[in-house]
Image (cartoon, rainbow, N blue to C red):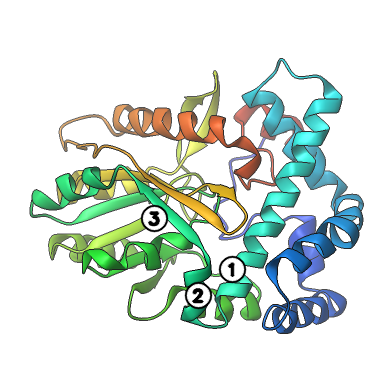
Amino acid sequence: MATTPSTTIEAPSRFRELQNTFLGRGLIKAFVRASGFLPVWFMRLFALGIVLPLAIPLTRTNFQEVRGNLRRMDPGKSGFKRALEACSVYKNYTYYLIDMMYLSHGPERAREYSVTITGGENLWRALEKGTGVLLLTSHLGNWEMGGRALAGIGRKIHVAYAPDSSNLFEHRRSLMRGDEAVHSVILKPGGMTSLTLYRLLADGELVAIQGDRLLFDRGLPVSFFGSPARFPQGPIRLAQLSGSPLVPIFIPMKGYKSYEIIIEAPLEMAAQDRTEDNLARVVSVLERHIGKYRTQWYTFRSFWEADLRKETD
């Protein structure tokens, strides 16, 4: 029998189970320490040769669900090519973690990375309105690169997010962000976090939030690559109530120590418009970029409504 979508902060997965074992915590500690002195290229080679050949069999269910998501996005590919793409998702996610850990050991390391900004004028257009700006990101590429890279605009970015269950990962994430450029706002059940974000926008601040995962939000079904999938409605309602423009932003990896920040044109979320219609406009932008960088979209659970129903029947 089908169930309603989960509203828990972390979707259960084999990743989480392994991460919270005694062995998993030990490996994370070793990874964090090694990232302080090993070069990125060496950690990548180690991941390709040792970590991934072990990780994929250990998370076989997640691997199959990644393949299912890729099939939804590109049904024309053969099963073999889709399996290779699923391996690329794992590889790119590992690269994301390596870069995050490496950068967390000191702000000077950011100078080793090349970050280009495309569409910077779109952010200035949104800022010129004189209200707050809601930056909508996704689990694509390396969303953590945005805060430091955009620090030059002279405005602090308030990132609303769900903390990782690993305290070690969470600590390193905070170090990478840096207190000066990014202020963290932890998402919690109830309306208090929404009220905090609304007040920040009302004060003309920048708020960043991811719009491709349900966090204490049952979401609304929207057509995504031709099939219904649920997306959170919270960011849309926040933009509607505050009158702040919503600016989609994506940060794909372009090469070794190289990223691009892509800033889309601001979208006005009129209060009188239906939330479903505004959400569909936003999802169409997400679809365009996720489709282009689908092996950098880190969603390790089934995402579409029909696939979720099959799992719970």
The residue shown at (76%, 61%) is: 44
Q: Earlier in the sequence, mark 3 or mark 1?
A: 1
Residue 58: percent from left, percent from top? 89, 55
Can you see residue 24?
yes
Discs 3, 1 touching: Cβ within 8 Å: no
Q: CA distance from mark 2 to mark 1?
A: 7 Å
Q: Position of residue 103 (x, y in %)?
A: 56, 74
Q: At 82% across and 66% down in the image, what residue appears?
A: 18
Mark before the other along the chain sequence, 2 or 1: 1
- 193 or 36: which is nearer to us? 36
Question: Mark on residue 176?
Answer: 2
- Residues marked 2 and 1 touching at CB (< 8 Å): yes
Q: Quadrant of residue 309?
A: top right
Circle 2: is it few (<14), some (14-19), or many (20+) Cα within 10 Å?
Answer: many
Q: Nearer the viewer, mark 2 or mark 3?
A: 2
Residue type beneath disc 3 = Ile
Q: Which residue is mark 1?
A: 100
Q: Is residue 81 above or below residue 18?
A: above
Residue 140 visible here: no
Three-letter code for the amino acid on which mark 2 is drawn: Met
